[in-house]
Image: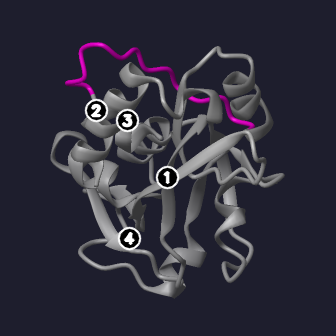
Amino acid sequence: METALQQLGSLSRVTFHEPPIEEVLLLEHLRTQKVDLIIDSVFPEEHAFIVEHLYDEEVVAVCRMDHPRINGSLSQQQFYSESHVLYQMTRKNISGLKFKADRVKKRNIKMEVSSLANVLLTVAKTDYISACSRTLAENWADILKIQVFKYPVELPRIPINMVYHRRFLNDPVHKQVREEIKSILS
């Protein structure tokens, strides 16, 4: 998850990769040892994987600071009347934030992007609005000149988990890296 990647940049012995859009590929990378662990919202139920919960991320709404119709607050009516950018990823075979947004009505989706960074860059330069993780949005709000709002529809927080293959459970180096990650993110 992009939010966690920025916070973990200080880990010198670790190389980070942006996750694939689809959960199936993400887990395949763990199985085939292309990656040693995942930090994401996935929760695989396979016995081969160990899942450790790190934290819960709040979903917020974002738009550019000088948006012509949104200034300081975002009502549910404004939310549905605006054009949206959708973060395109697949978890549990459901795409975008649809997997968390069963109470969100149909929106006017104008663009789909494959990363939260692209969400922020797009809303910073257009009149579109979008959903984003609170941590990432607040980290970049001043630099990108974006507004951050409570999401106008009730959504559950997104659980962020550390997932790794059982083969690494007792590996001392892997265990030390996991502990460092937990100390930074928890």
Classify mark 2: residues with Cα within 10 Å, few (<14), some (14-19) or many (20+): some
Q: Measuring 29% from the left and 34% from the top, which residue is drawn there?
A: 6
The residue stretch that appears in magenta? 9-22
Q: In this view, does 14 lie to the left or right of 24?
A: left
Q: Is residue 109 magenta?
A: no
Residue position marked by numbered label 1 in the rendering: 52
Look at label 3 and name its amino acid: Arg
Counting residues from the N terminus, which is met first, the one under dot 4 or under dot 2? 2
Classify mark 1: residues with Cα within 10 Å, few (<14), some (14-19) or many (20+): some
Q: Measuring 38% from the left and 23% from the top, which residue is drawn there?
A: 172
Position above or below: 123 against 174: below
Look at label 4 and name its amino acid: Arg
Residue 178, numbered circle = 3
Residue nearest the observer in this picture, 170 or 9: 170
Callouts 3 and 1 close, C-beta under 8 Å: yes
Circle 1 sits in a helix, a strand or a loop, which is it?
strand
Callouts 3 and 4 close, C-beta under 8 Å: no
Which residue is situated farthest in the right direction here? 93
Residue position marked by numbered label 2 in the rendering: 8
Circle 3 sits in a helix, a strand or a loop, which is it?
helix
Position above or below: 127 against 114: below
Tell me the distance, in whole angstroms, between the alpha carbons under discs 1 and 2.
17 Å
Q: Measuring 66% from the left and 29% from the top, which residue is drawn there?
A: 20
The part of the image, by quadrant, that contains residue 12 is top left
Q: Measuring 71% from the left and 64% from the top, which residue is drawn there?
A: 98
Circle 2 sits in a helix, a strand or a loop, which is it?
loop
